[in-house]
């Protein structure tokens, strides 16, 4: 097969007899494919963007050219998708690494260990976690871990924990962050330190203010 045009060096493309016979039956379509290919190449060189069109062949032998809507910037779209996908993957990896680091702390204990400190059973610990009476943090591989500091000197969970879930939502990680962060409203102390001093009402007031958007 020879492709030629005015002012352009002819191009010879060797093809098999079967292919040539099939193309010969669709002369108009073959011309359309070649023309679209030429336009696509010219557009790509002119704009520096990827251009796409498809050739659809039906079992009946019908051939038609399919153009994407608005001949969108394929290369730009694919690059954006790759960038977004890789960004999300990196963010997820960072989050999982941070969670794993937190769960590896010495003050994070298993349900069995927390049950021993509370003088109860693992079943009870799990039940109280489901009831939002205990903070249980779940990681990507380590299962649930429980902050040991949520127990007072008598081995009882802070009574304020259910109220914190009510104020801040159902995420145990949100409650963990609130309790471990320092708050100006508590003279720069963590909520844990305030609870250890028996300042439950102040801590709950700060949590309510955060939930209402009063404090950042």
Image (cartoon, grey):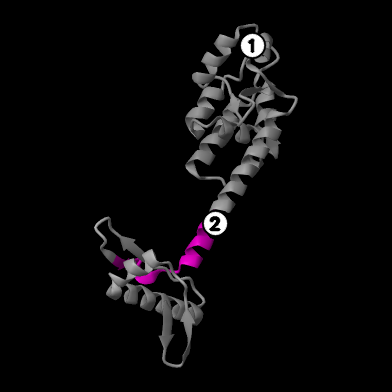
Q: What label does residue 183 carry, if any?
A: none
Q: Which residue is mark 1?
A: 115
The image quadrant where one finds the N terminus is bottom left
Q: List the residue tagged with mark 2.
A: 82
The percent position of residue 5, horizontal first and vertical second, equals 41, 88
Task: Tell me which label, 2 or 1, sits earlier in the chain.
Answer: 2
Q: Quadrant of residue 125?
A: top right
User: Is residue 183 toward the left or the right of residue 31 in the image?
Assistant: right
Prevalent SS, magenta region: helix
Residue 65 is one of the magenta-drawn residues: yes
Q: Is residue 155 visible?
A: no
**Direction right: furthest residue:** 106
Q: Nearer the viewer, mark 2 or mark 1?
A: 2
Using the rendered view, name the quadrant where residue 199 is placed. Answer: top right
Label 1 crowding class (10 Å Cα cut-off): few <14, some 14-19, many 20+? some
Residue at point 33% right, 77% down?
31
Q: Nearer the viewer, residue 69 or 95?
A: 69
Residue at 53% in and 62% down? 79
Q: Is residue 96 visible?
A: yes
Residue 114 occupies quadrant: top right
Camera-side residue of 1 and 163:
1
Residue 3 horizontal/vertical position (percent)? 42, 81
**Which secondary structure, mark 1?**
helix
Q: Residue at x 54, y 56 (%)?
A: 82
Whole-percent x and y of residue 124? 55, 10
- Verify whether residue 142 appears in magenta: no
Whole-number angstrom distance, CA of label 2 to CA of label 1: 47 Å
- What secondary structure is marked by label 2? helix
């Amino acid at each position: 097969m020879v492709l030629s045009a005015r002012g352009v060096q002819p191009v010879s493309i060797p093809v098999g007899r079967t292919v040539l016979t099939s193309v010969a039956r669709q002369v108009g379509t073959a011309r359309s494919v070649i023309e679209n290919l030429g336009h696509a190449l010219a557009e790509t060189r002119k704009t520096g963007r990827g251009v796409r069109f498809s050739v659809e062949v039906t079992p009946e032998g019908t051939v038609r050219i399919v153009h994407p809507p608005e001949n969108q910037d394929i290369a730009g779209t694919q690059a954006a998708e790759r960038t977004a996908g890789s960004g999300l993957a990196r963010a997820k990896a960072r989050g999982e690494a941070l969670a794993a680091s937190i769960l590896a702390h010495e003050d994070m204990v298993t349900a069995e260990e927390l049950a021993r400190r509370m003088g109860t059973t693992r079943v009870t610990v799990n039940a109280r976690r489901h009831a939002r009476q205990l903070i249980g943090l779940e990681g990507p591989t380590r299962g649930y871990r429980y902050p040991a500091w949520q127990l007072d000197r008598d081995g009882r969970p802070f009574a304020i924990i259910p109220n914190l879930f009510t104020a801040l939502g159902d995420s145990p990680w949100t409650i963990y962050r609130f309790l471990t962060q320092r708050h100006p409203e508590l003279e720069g102390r963590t909520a844990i330190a305030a609870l250890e001093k028996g300042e439950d009402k102040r801590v709950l007031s700060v949590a309510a203010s955060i939930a209402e958007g009063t404090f950042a």
